[in-house]
Every structure is written in structure tokens, then in C-alpha cells.
Amino acid sequence: MNAVARREKHKAEFRTQILDAAREIFVHDGYQSFSMRKLAQRIEYSPGSIYLYFKNKQELFDCLVEESFEQLLKALQTIQSQPEPDAVKQLKKGLRTYVDFGLRCPNHYKFAFLLRTVDTKRPWKPHPAFDVARQMVRRCVQEKRFLPVDIETTAQALWAASHGVTSLLLQRPTFPWVAKDRLIQQVINSAVDSLVVPSGATNGN
């Protein structure tokens, strides 16, 4: 490995170190209590070293949010790319993947959905991860597996149900929940099955 390659490798590793430490501080202390100086102390570098990569804590926070969404997007795209003849089953798998991602990667999930600040100056732009869910709902409608529904409303409602159970399990771990797998599947089945065309019925959509 030549000198240039070694420098690039070191830069990439240091950037990852910054992000990993920042994520832990943000989740543990919250956005308001976070400071670049606190981060510098955690990784034992000077604040100036961090500013070479991120100009302020908002840029650092935004980077972590986007990184979290990208991880979720990859998980959803994996489900979407797997052959599944039943559109409803694929949708349920997608919703379960969403919940499992949040429970498996709580820091990523908290960044994407619980700690994220709302910038009212910037127009809302749905992330591609939500568009994957929308596409799964659209498939159910196009293949006439769902009763006549509005795709956007349905996608948002299913997201709300999935987010609800995920955030509750993360933020209320001491609540006497029933078996998590059973609870999660009940929420997903209740949300999706109410939209499915009954067996033997005809969807006039």
C-alpha cells in the first residue's frame, strides 16, 4: 500500500471513529447536550481534527441520520429484491424488516426517527426507504389483493403502526410485554389483514 492509499485509509477510519463516537453521545446525552469538544475528548483528538471532516454538530448529526436511513433502505431493498409471489406476504416481510432493524440497530433507528430534528425551512422530502414501503403497498393494490384504498394514506398508516411498536419496545423496555415476536406479528397482521380482499370476494378496483 503506497503513501496516498495509507492516508486515504486513515482518513476513512478516522471519519468512522468520529461517527461511531458521535452517535453514542447523541443517543446518550441528546442533541442539545452534544458538543464537538465532548466528542473530541471521547476520541482523544483535538476539536480541530474533527472540524476537518464536519463543520459543526448539525452537519455531523445530519450525516448520522442519513447513514441510519441508508442502513434501513438496504434492509428493505433486500426484501423487495427477493422473489415473493404473494404481494401481501412481501409487504408483511417488509414491515417486519423495518421493526427488526429498529430493534437490532437501536442507535440507527433513534437517529432516523426519534432524535431527528425538524427543519421547517426545508421542504419535507420522503426518503427512498419510505418509497420502498409505498411500492409494496402499490403492488398489493395493483394485484387486487387489497380493498380499494389510497396508496399514500395506507403506506403512512402502516408506517405509523410499525413505528409505534418499534419505538415503544425501544423506549419502554421494562414494560411487561408479551413475547416480542408475537406482539410484533400481531401489530403487523392487524394492520395489513384489515386491508386484504376477503377470500372469494372480488375487488372492483
Image (tube, rainbow, N blue to C red):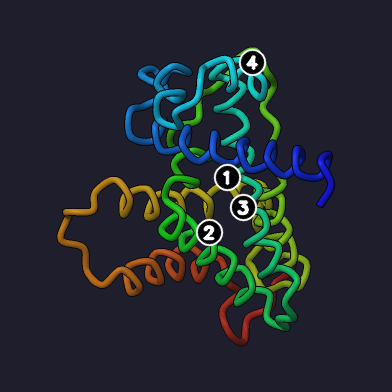
Marks 2 and 1, the one that precedes in the sequence: 1
Query: Contact (CB < 8 A) between labels 1 and 3?
Result: yes
Q: Please state the horizontal and vertical placement of residue 101, each as a whole percent of the image.
A: 50, 59
Residue at the bottom extreme, as displayed: 200
Quickly name the residue at label 4: 55
Q: Measure how far apart labels 1 and 3 are at the Cα level.
A: 5 Å
Q: Quadrant of the C terminus?
A: bottom right
Q: Measure how far apart labels 4 and 3 are at the Cα level.
A: 24 Å
**Which numbered disc covers residue 152?**
none
Answer with left or right where residue 185 lies relative to residue 146.
Answer: left
**Which numbered disc covers residue 71?**
3
Q: Measure how far apart labels 2 and 3 are at the Cα level.
A: 11 Å
Number of the front mark, 2 or 3: 3
**Which numbered disc covers residue 98?**
2
Badge 4 crowding class, 10 Å Cα cut-off, few under 14, some 14 to 19, many 20 or more, is few
Query: Contact (CB < 8 A) between labels 4 and 2?
Result: no
Badge 3 crowding class, 10 Å Cα cut-off, few under 14, some 14 to 19, many 20 or more, is some
**Which numbered disc covers residue 68?**
1
Q: Please state the horizontal and vertical placement of residue 5, each as a whole percent of the image.
A: 81, 45
Q: Nearer the viewer, residue 114 or 124?
A: 114
Badge 2 crowding class, 10 Å Cα cut-off, few under 14, some 14 to 19, many 20 or more, is many
Q: Measure how far apart labels 4 and 2 are at the Cα level.
A: 32 Å
Q: Please state the horizontal and vertical placement of residue 81, each as a whole percent of the image.
A: 75, 71
